[in-house]
Image (spheres, rainbow, N blue to C red):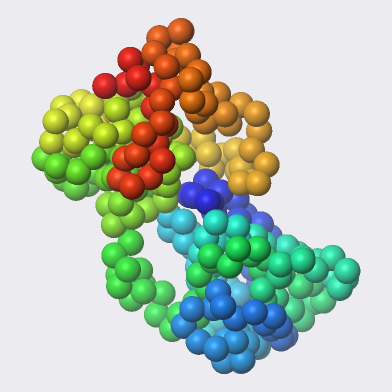
Amino acid sequence: MPELPEVHNFKLYFDAAATGQTIGRVTVHDDYIIRNMPGPAFADALTGRTIVDSLRRGKYLFANLDNGHALLLHFGMTGDLNLYQEPEDRGKFERFALHFTDGNILGFDDPRKFARILYLQDRDAYIKEIKLGPDALDISLEDWLDAVTGRKATIKGLLLNQSILAGVGNLYADEICYRTRIHPAARACDLSEEQLSDIHAETIAVMTYGTENAPYYKDYPEDWFWHVWREEGKAGPNGVGEVKITKVAGRTTYYVEGWQS
């Protein structure tokens, strides 16, 4: 599933394709992923609007419109963007498309239809309504410690809690725990301030590296984080420990037994 770095990549693509563009019409092929209005109403609301800029917050991408409203793109597991001009270049699983007045078309593809698309009259009210926390790239150490110190929840569960920090998903949470040598099932109340601070530092480091290298989630490079170690039975760093699989916070979790504690 696209997480913060992957959605950052989508933002770069979206900004290059759509910023300053006026939507001449909208084609809706399947309105299942449009969660708060029927397809025809969605098309009417966007037609004639100009995309001013965008905001990424965690895994959410908001396209800000010239009337003060916003289009929310939440990519789910298989959402994707496709800019094209010719009909034959339309994606096989395109669910809707924005037809810009300059002749370009921006399609939203989603084979599994887990994406969430919303037309929002008040973006900030929506962010508050869903209790979306600070972006994982921006959260301060002070705010992180205030949010997690003394909590009985597992550290992985807290990393995945989007109301605490937005943008970290399953794969990156495992990577952060691996880098700090902290077991994903360790409870925050049992960790020292130094360990919690290390988690914060590695969260920022992993998210920064991820955004600077802008991964496409369907084609990670061979040396991308978990490709290096996330394989059951593989020896840990310098031959210490062995990669195991367990369940933490309801999610499949990889860790190195004998290396993380």
Q: Is residue 11 visible in the rendered structure shown here?
A: no
Whole-percent x and y of residue 53? 56, 68
- Foreground: 243 or 139? 243
What residue is rendered at 35% in x and 19% in y?
Answer: 257
Q: Is residue 131 visible in the rendered structure shown here?
A: yes
What residue is rendered at 84% in x and 70% in y?
Answer: 85
Q: How many marks?
A: 0
Q: Against 28, is 145 above or below?
A: above
Q: Against 231, is 101 above or below?
A: below
- Foreground: 38 or 248? 248
The C terminus lies in quadrant: top left
Whole-percent x and y of residue 162? 33, 55
Q: Is residue 94 left or right of residue 247?
A: right
What residue is rendered at 32% in x and 21% in y?
Answer: 260
- Foreground: 59 or 146? 59
What residue is rendered at 86% in x and 73% in y?
Answer: 87
Using the rendered view, name the quadrant where residue 181 is placed. top left
Whole-percent x and y of residue 146? 16, 45
- Foreground: 111 or 123? 111
Whole-percent x and y of residue 129? 30, 72
